[in-house]
Amino acid sequence: MTVALINLRKSRMSRRAIGVVAVLTLLAACDKSDAATDTPTEVTVQVGPEAMTIAATTVLSTGPILSGSLVAERTAQIRAEVPGSVVQVFHDPGARVAQGTSLAKIDDRAINDAYLSARSGLTAAQTAADIAKRELERAEKLVAAGAISDRDVENARRGTLAATTMADDARARLAGAQKQLDATNVLAPYAGVVSERFVNPGDVVAPGSPLFNIVDPATMRLEAAVPAEQLAQVRMGAPVRFSVTGYPGRTFSGTISSINPSADPQTRQVRLFVRIPNSGNQLVAGLFAEGRVASNSRETLTVPEMAIDNRGLVPSVLRLKNGRTEKVEVTLGAKDEAQERVEITAGIAAGDTLLMGPALGISPNTPLKVTAPSDSKPRVP
């Protein structure tokens, strides 16, 4: 009986041990399951190619930024010089004219009558002057022979002087009448384009009334201003490269032709003028232009300004390497305001793929995938 009691106790202890092991095994399994549940799953971020760029060696230009409007270097407003009614108008706005081309005709009947009268007056005055001159010559010969007195010679001299003066006055009157008669035919002062016409046939004009505007498009001029502190970077003859509204993707060039010797007392800016050849007549006056004085240009490593993260103490970029983002601190150099690019002197190399814009908010060491077709590439400057 004792032996049976001992065996019964051993059986109960064995069952208890098995139960404890089962509970511990279950708890261990639960712990492993909880641990597996707590481990976060790595998420791959997708971005488009517009959020990426490639660091590249480009030409970096530095110099003052210029902006202003284009104006024709030669512009003339033609005004009436004589009164009268406009008989004919020969050209409309947009017409190209040569120097001396007739633009309009003003009624010249009254002026022509005055011209004919002045011409007749000159003929009479010149005839009287010739007669007086011959009388003086005769008197001088007679006084030499003792036939007349010196007083008669003096009277002849005075008569000749008066006749000559009247002839000169008649000649001046004829020249004035000729000038007025010529002014009835309105001529182009130089080759150009009629930009505006202010009169129509039948209009009555007075001296000073505007008739036409003539623009010579062969040479344009950009009027701009630079801050006084940048004046050292500006010199006569310095090249200027600029873009013009209405010509996307095209760059024009000119040279600084003059610099105002005084700064504006309110803005502290100095006005300057850029001469722009326009042999093909592509540029039009009145368009807005923006560019820069190319005071210094060199090849260097640059990236778009949107690829620089300035939120930290040190500027940095977010580089894509081996499919993951990598934060890299960089050293900045000069900045091209017109192209919106920044020089990188240390930190990255040419060919590195960088994120820019809102994509700079992605955390470092994040898996990244570019959502672009197989033939698409990141934007290269």
Image (cartoon, helix red, strand yellow):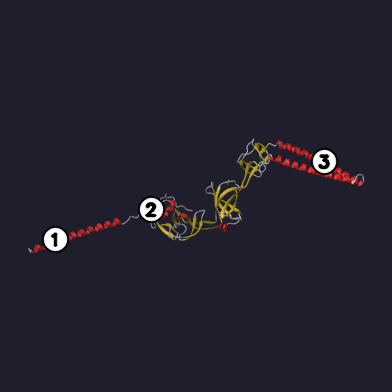
Q: Please tell me the numbered disc located at residue 12.
A: 1
Sequence-first tag of 1 and 3: 1
* Label 1: how many Cα within 10 Å (few below 14, some 14–19, many 20+): few
Which residue ends up furthest to the right in the rendered image? 146
Q: Please tell me the numbered disc located at residue 45.
A: 2
How much space separates mark 1 and mark 2, taking CA atoms? Answer: 59 Å
Sequence-first tag of 2 and 3: 2
Query: Of residues 330 and 174, which is closer to you in this image?
Result: 174
Left or right relative to 70: residue 331: left
Q: Which residue is mark 3?
A: 128
Q: Amino acid at mark 3?
A: Ala
Q: Secondary structure at mark 3?
A: helix
Q: Amino acid at mark 2?
A: Val
Verify CB contact (< 8 Å) between mark 1 and mark 2.
no
Residue 329 in picture, x, y percent from top left:
44, 60
Q: Please tell me the numbered disc located at residue 342.
A: none
Q: Secondary structure at mark 2?
A: strand
